[in-house]
């Protein structure tokens, strides 16, 4: 468990190197989400996106990237909203240990 | 006349990638516009073409790689990306050295593009 000081005011990791699967579970728990296989698939995809594009995705590119990488059934807002209710790009990035996406309300 | 006619919006990116924060700010503007479903076309002019180079050693500066961020443009549905052909020639940059497919434009074509757009933001 990381101490509260490891996170910013909105719950994003201050130091991206602190991330681990255990930390992901800690962040998810704070968001009221229990991580299952389907969540981990998106978390890995988000980390891959960040490594490739040096940025956290907004919703639109996240949906499109999911469609490209995981197929059309998962490249849908509704699929992502079920896993990460509210704001999938923002909450998914938070759990994946990435910076807050720039274009999120 | 239908109100659904979309305005053509052109963002002109003129700054070298790591000279201050101007280049990054313009790219952020493009991504924000696209994230909010605005149609936007990009024109990289002069030193701005350097933003599109592959393998920018941005880590050495403690910065994010603009080239890598720009390689996500197709995921933002930004499909129309033009570059200043004369600037590419001046820097001896081949089109395949860039992070994504672009349309090189000669000076006259740049003028025509600017005239054809309804809104033009130069950053």
Image (spheres, coloured by chain):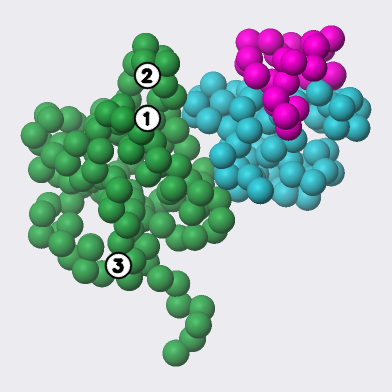
Chain colours: A cyan, B green
Q: What is the x, y in percent for residue B120?
A: 30, 61
The residue singled out by tag 1 in the image is B67
Residue drawn at x 47%, y 37% as measured from the top left: B72
The residue singled out by tag 3 in the image is B117
- Chain of the residue under label 2: B
Reply yes or no: does residue A10 show up in magenta.
Answer: yes
The relative height of residue A8 versus residue B38 in the rendered view (above or below) is above
Q: Nearer the viewer, residue B108 or A93?
A: A93
Residue drawn at x 8%, y 34% as measured from the top left: B90
Count the marks.
3
Which element is circle 1 on? helix
Which tag, 1 or 2, sits closer to the chain's start? Answer: 2
Q: What is the x, y in percent for residue B43?
A: 28, 50
Start-end of magenta stretch:
A1-26
Q: What is the x, y in percent for residue A11?
A: 75, 27
Marks 1 and 2: same chain? yes
Any part of residue B97 in sight: yes
Q: Which residue occupies the extreme bottom position in the image? A: B1
Reply yes or no: does residue A19 show up in magenta.
Answer: yes
**Label pair 1/2, CB-CB below 8 angstroms:** yes
- Chain of the residue under label 1: B
Q: Nearer the viewer, residue A41 or B2?
A: B2
Disc 1 crowd rating (10 Å Cα; few below 14, some 14-19, many 20+) is: many
The residue singled out by tag 2 in the image is B58
Q: Nearer the viewer, residue B108 or A18?
A: A18
Marks 2 and 3: same chain? yes
Q: Is residue B98 left or right of residue A73?
A: left
- Chain of the residue under label 3: B
The relative height of residue B49 versus residue B43 in the rendered view (above or below) is above
For the residues labelled 3 and 1, the Cα–Cα distance comes to 25 Å
């Amino acid at each position: 468990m990381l101490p509260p000081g490891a996170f910013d005011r909105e719950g994003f990791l201050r130091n991206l190197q602190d991330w681990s699967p255990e930390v992901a579970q800690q962040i998810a728990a704070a968001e009221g989400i229990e991580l299952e296989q389907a969540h981990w698939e998106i978390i890995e995809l988000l980390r891959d996106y960040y490594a490739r594009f040096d940025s956290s995705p907004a919703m639109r590119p996240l949906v499109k990237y999911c469609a490209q990488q995981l197929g059309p059934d998962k490249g849908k807002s509704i699929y992502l909203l079920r896993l990460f209710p509210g704001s999938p790009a923002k909450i998914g990035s938070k759990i994946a240990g990435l910076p807050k996406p720039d274009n999120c309300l | 006349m239908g109100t659904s006619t979309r305005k053509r919006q052109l963002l002109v990116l003129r700054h070298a990638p790591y000279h201050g924060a101007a280049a990054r700010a313009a790219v952020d503007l493009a991504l924000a516009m696209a994230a909010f479903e605005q149609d936007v076309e990009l024109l990289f002019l002069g030193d701005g073409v350097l933003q599109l180079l592959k393998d920018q050693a941005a880590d050495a500066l403690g910065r994010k790689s603009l080239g890598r961020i720009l390689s996500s443009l197709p995921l933002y549905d930004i499909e129309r990306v033009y570059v200043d052909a004369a600037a590419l020639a001046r820097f001896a940059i081949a089109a395949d050295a860039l992070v994504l497919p672009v349309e090189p434009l000669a000076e006259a074509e740049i003028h025509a593009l600017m005239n054809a757009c309804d809104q033009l933001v130069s950053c």
